[in-house]
């Protein structure tokens, strides 16, 4: 006997298309009862026979309605079940690990630090922008100079990094 792999897609239905289910059998019996009632009612031509035909027809309509509603509901539940299994299987897939080059990480940290310096100096510049004293004007000039130097350094780091990427050959196998 084979084992079932719980992590794979759900197994296809074991029911074959040509084999009728219990609902189809019940509806077939009710159709047969309706036909028999119609034949007897037509042969005897009595009111009681036609009442039996009406009752059999109503039972057939009721059974067909219940069968169709339950069948549609079962299909909807089956679709939900399949979606849930697919979501669980996707969640249980092994996670891929992204490897970040140490140089790349250091480069990002340096750029982050440069942007933080620029933000701090921006706050200093805004604080001293309306100051009329020589000290406020001096701090504003130093803040603007620091922003200029830091921005130039950050741009130089980006330029060097781009040149290094273009100059280095890529090792490994190309995967489509």
Image (cartoon, rainbow, N blue to C red):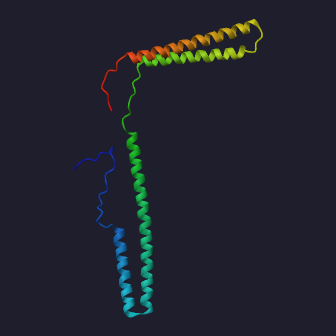
**Vertical comparison of 151 with 47: above or below:** above
Judge from the rendering whether residue 137 lies leftward or rightward of residue 168; answer left or right. right
Nearer to the camera, 89 or 132: 132
Query: Where, by quadrant of the figure, is residue 59 drawn?
Result: bottom left
Quarter holding residue 105: top left
- Above-or-below relation of 38 to 91: below
Rendered location of residue 168, percent (x, y): 37, 16
Nearer-the-camera pick, 170 or 45:
170
Q: Nearer the viewer, residue 129 or 85?
A: 129
Look at 38% across and 85% down and name the residue there. 37
Residue at 77 percent across and 8 percent down: it is: 133
Quadrant placement of the C terminus: top left
Who's the residue at 69% across and 11% down the image?
Answer: 140
| Residue 126 in picture, x, y percent from top left | 70, 17
Picture coordinates of residue 45 (x, y %)? 41, 93
Q: Nearer the viewer, residue 169 or 48?
A: 169
Picture quadrant of residue 47: bottom left
59 to 9, vertically: above or below: below
Q: Position of residue 141 (x, y in %)?
A: 68, 9
């Amino acid at each position: 006997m084979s084992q079932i792999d719980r992590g794979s897609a759900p197994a296809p239905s074991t029911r074959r298309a040509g084999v009728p289910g219990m609902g189809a059998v019940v509806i077939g019996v009710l159709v047969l009862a309706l036909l028999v009632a119609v034949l007897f009612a037509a042969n005897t031509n009595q009111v009681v026979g036609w009442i039996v035909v009406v009752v059999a027809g109503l039972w057939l309509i009721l059974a067909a309605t219940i069968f169709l509603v339950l069948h549609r509901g079962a299909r909807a539940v089956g679709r939900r079940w399949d979606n849930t299994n697919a979501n669980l299987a996707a969640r249980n897939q092994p996670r891929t690990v992204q490897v970040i080059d140490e140089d790349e990480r250091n480069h990002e940290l340096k750029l982050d630090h440069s942007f933080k310096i620029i933000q701090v100096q921006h706050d200093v510049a805004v604080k001293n922008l309306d100051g009329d004293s020589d000290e406020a004007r001096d701090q504003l000039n130093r803040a603007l100079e620091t922003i200029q130097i830091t921005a130039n350094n950050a741009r130089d780091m980006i330029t060097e990094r781009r040149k290094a990427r273009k100059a280095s050959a890529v090792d490994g196998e190309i995967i489509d």
